[in-house]
Amino acid sequence: MSKTSIGRMTEGKPLTLILRFAFPLLLGNLFQQTYNMVDAAIVGQTLGADALGSVGASTSVQFLVIGFCIGICAGFSIPVAQTFGAKKYENLRKYIYHAILLTVLFGAILTVGCALLCGTILHVLRTPAELYSDAYIYLFIIFLGIPFNLTYNLCSSILRAVGDGRTPFLFLAFSATLNIALDFLCIMGFHWGTAGAAIATVFSQALSGFLCIIFMRKRHPFLNVTEKEKHWDGHFAKILCVMGLPMGLQYSITAIGSMVMQSANNSLGAIYVSGYAAGMKIKQLAMCPFDALATGVSTFVGQNYGANQIDRVRKGVRQGIWAGIIYGVAIGVVLIFFGRPMSLLFVNAEYTQMLDASGQYLRALGFFYWVLGILNVCRMSVQALGFSIRAVFSGVLEMIARTVVSFALVPYFAFNAICIADQCAWISAAIYISITLRWCLKKIETRHAAV
């Protein structure tokens, strides 16, 4: 089997291929969330609940910025998956070259802009005064690490587009292990506080990203851009921007709603800031299988669409949705009954009010987690088919739902309203994107029949 056939998803049972691809990606996501949780756990257990709140006070804006990075890199990989499925390897490498140039440009703009606006962002989020100093240091360092985050995400997105989910997992596992070790060294050894947690995260991401580049060039030489292919072509750049920017904006637009929601929650006081921070870490961990499954379906859809196998596209999407729903029901039960005990990972049992808040938030989420199985798979499938702009509107609906709840209900129902905001966003977006996916599938079938 040639290197270029590794990871091809145009033959075989759809669900088997999707799950096989998604499994190492899932492990990678779990490792990533693990070291995020370790940051929070070490900070909370050693520095206290206020320090945990400082790290968590900017979670939504981190999701906005890092989500944009992940989104544009995932969008850049769509033409790579399609050209890989169509066996057009010269065009594949041209897309990679232009993706690198665009990533450098976006990385520079984001790093400078976010670093300069760090204080303003925390004020907009209404970060409590007692948490502001540590929150600023942590967020500023995370923003300085944006180029390293982009490096890893671009490499991993390209590798996944050609069906190699194993390599990104290996380097993410390495990064997670290194991050944990550096957490102990920087926080407990050097006593750098929340800055130590951020430094550990950025350094481990940087090393992982650069090693991934080296390994990718040696393991998959067909991805290496030749001198002949290193010239600017507006056509390739335009297609990448059409794919990447909407996906990045979708993540960011979704995060804007989360920022409004977090700002409303921050106004409730430090107890709810810390409780929400703990709940968010567990929520993100529980969402890892959704992300892995949706990415697996997206890669399957992109390759088979490129190979003009529309029936396989439909079958893969349908089976992926059902797999997501089944997982959502199962993990929902876990969150309902064990959300509060799981929050003990982050603080001691004496912080009862914080634990109660975290448990309440997770319990409310648990009843609706299955909706994410529909939302994530449908949204990623729409993007993989090339309708990225339409997928953006699902993020807009999430933003609107969270904003309405935050402004209209939090003043009257306080933290109880925070506990229903995500569910309102998920349901609104899932209804829209499932209808949109049906339209997109009919559209490509009509195109295919006309050829």
Image (cartoon, rainbow, N blue to C red):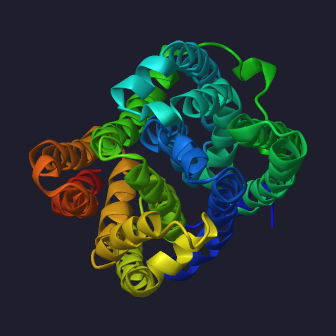
Depicted 273 relative to depicted 235: above or below: below
| Residue 13 in view of the camera | no
Residue at point 64% right, 38% down? 154
Report how many numbered discs are placed on residues in the image: 0
Which quadrant does the N terminus fall into? bottom right
Q: Position of residue 311 (x, y in %)?
A: 35, 71
Q: Is residue 231 left or right of residue 291?
A: right
Q: Position of residue 200 (x, y in %)?
A: 78, 42
Q: Position of residue 282 (x, y in %)?
A: 51, 66
Asked whether 311 or 128 is in front, the reply is 128
Depicted 49 relative to depicted 255: above or below: below
Residue at point 38% right, 30% down? 242
Answer with the quarter of the image where residue 97 lies: top right
Q: Is residue 274 left or right of residue 169?
A: left
Residue at point 44% right, 59% down? 275
Q: Position of residue 280 (x, y in %)?
A: 46, 58
